[in-house]
């Protein structure tokens, strides 16, 4: 997965210093920042306006790029270092020229619960998953206070949860379930990605991606709104799902380390003394007619089976030889 080195600052304060972070090749900058904010910033900054500059080095003067651009394409053209400059609420308010509608204020401060809105006519299975998750939250009595909160915090949560479920589903939910037992709560959201229809081979789990997905999920578990009673039905299962993603990531890392150790080891994996040995004899050109008759059934059996199939030759030995062998 491509890597972009990221720094986030507000005025002269560094909120997150330089660190290389993975990014999907089709992810827009605004979505990339959304993932960064969830993982590394406090909730106060999740919906912050920002400007971003890409540059070829940490010290170079960057090029300002639109948040609608694809992050990886921007890094290829302008450099892999992306500095996000967060904009203060005061600056945002000066940019808003339209008067605030009183009805919008009342609606935003409402205590009614809302869920995020998604396209009622989804174009693909992933969009359908987001819509179903939003309805799922609503049907279980969950939601966010105020429509604005639902359209920002709620939509981000549903999108990230859908991303984690889709990631597992497209790799193999069965594999993860066999190793760590996925919470039953999420079973209905698997079997939607249809990886057998992919043009390329089915993608494999990545320890890095699992870690990123785990961090996103577990961060939500700690937020204040998740501690409210309206999310009691979800909190425990969500925490367990995030934990097993982290455990599977650790398992894959251990397997990778072990594979490298075996590859670099000079000691044979198999002990030749314990494994036994095999000796190949040259073909016997001349055969005694008596032996041909004696071992006819064995010869027929060997010609019948494939060369890799084992044959118990004791079953074809003459009775007198078997008795002589047992008595000796």
Image (cartoon, rainbow, N blue to C red):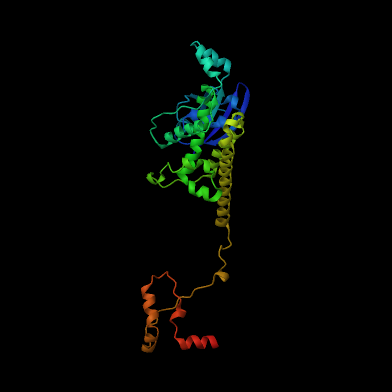
Q: Position of residue 272 (x, y in %)?
A: 55, 69
Residue 273, above or below 44: below
Residue 297, above or below 135: below
Seen as rendered, the residue at the extreme right is 13
Q: Position of residue 163 (x, y in %)?
A: 49, 37
* Residue 62 visible: no
Residue 74, above or below 242: above
Residue 155, above or below 296: above
Q: Position of residue 19 (x, y in %)?
A: 58, 34
Return the residue nearer the eye: 298 or 57: 298
Return the residue nearer the eye: 28 or 140: 140
* Residue at the (49%, 85%) spot, across then down: 322
In which quadrant of the rendered image does the C terminus lie?
Answer: bottom right
* Residue at the (57%, 44%) spot, across then down: 244
* Residue 165 visible: yes
Q: Position of residue 298 (x, y in %)?
A: 40, 80
Return the residue nearer the eye: 115 or 176: 115
Which quadrant of the figure has residue 199? top left
* Residue at the (41%, 37%) spot, across then down: 125
Q: Is 190 on the left-hand or right-hand side of 207?
A: left
Return the residue nearer the eye: 26 or 155: 155
Count all numbered tags in the image, as a single digit.
0
């Amino acid at each position: 997965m491509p890597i972009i080195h990221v720094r986030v600052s507000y005025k002269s304060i560094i909120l997150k210093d330089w660190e290389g972070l993975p990014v999907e090749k089709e992810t827009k900058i605004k979505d990339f920042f959304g993932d960064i904010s969830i993982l590394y910033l406090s909730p106060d900054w999740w919906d912050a306006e920002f400007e971003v500059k890409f540059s070829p080095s940490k010290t170079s003067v960057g090029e300002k790029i639109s948040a609608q651009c694809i992050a990886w394409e921007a890094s290829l053209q302008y450099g892999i270092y992306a500095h996000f400059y967060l904009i203060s609420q005061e600056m945002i308010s000066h940019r808003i020229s339209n008067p605030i509608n009183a009805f919008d204020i009342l609606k935003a401060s409402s205590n009614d619960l809302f869920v995020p809105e998604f396209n009622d006519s989804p174009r693909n299975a992933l969009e359908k998953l987001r819509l179903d998750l939003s309805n799922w939250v609503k049907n279980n009595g969950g939601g966010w206070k105020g429509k604005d909160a639902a359209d920002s915090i709620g939509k981000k949560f549903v999108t990230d949860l859908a991303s984690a479920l889709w990631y597992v589903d497209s790799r193999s939910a069965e594999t993860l379930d066999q190793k760590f037992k996925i919470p039953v709560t999420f079973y209905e959201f698997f079997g939607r990605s249809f990886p057998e229809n992919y043009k390329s081979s089915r993608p494999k789990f990545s320890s890095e991606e699992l870690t990123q997905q785990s961090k996103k999920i577990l961060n939500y578990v700690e937020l204040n709104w998740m501690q409210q009673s309206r999310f009691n039905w979800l909190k425990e299962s969500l925490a367990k799902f995030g934990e097993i993603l982290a455990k599977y990531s650790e398992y894959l890392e251990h397997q990778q380390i072990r594979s490298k150790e075996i590859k670099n080891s000079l000691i044979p994996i198999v002990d030749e003394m314990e494994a036994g040995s095999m000796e190949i004899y040259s073909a016997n050109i001349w055969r005694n007619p008596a032996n041909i008759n004696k071992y006819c059934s064995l010869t027929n059996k060997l010609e019948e089976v494939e060369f890799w199939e084992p044959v118990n030759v004791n079953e074809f030995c003459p009775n007198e030889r078997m008795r002589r062998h047992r008595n000796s």
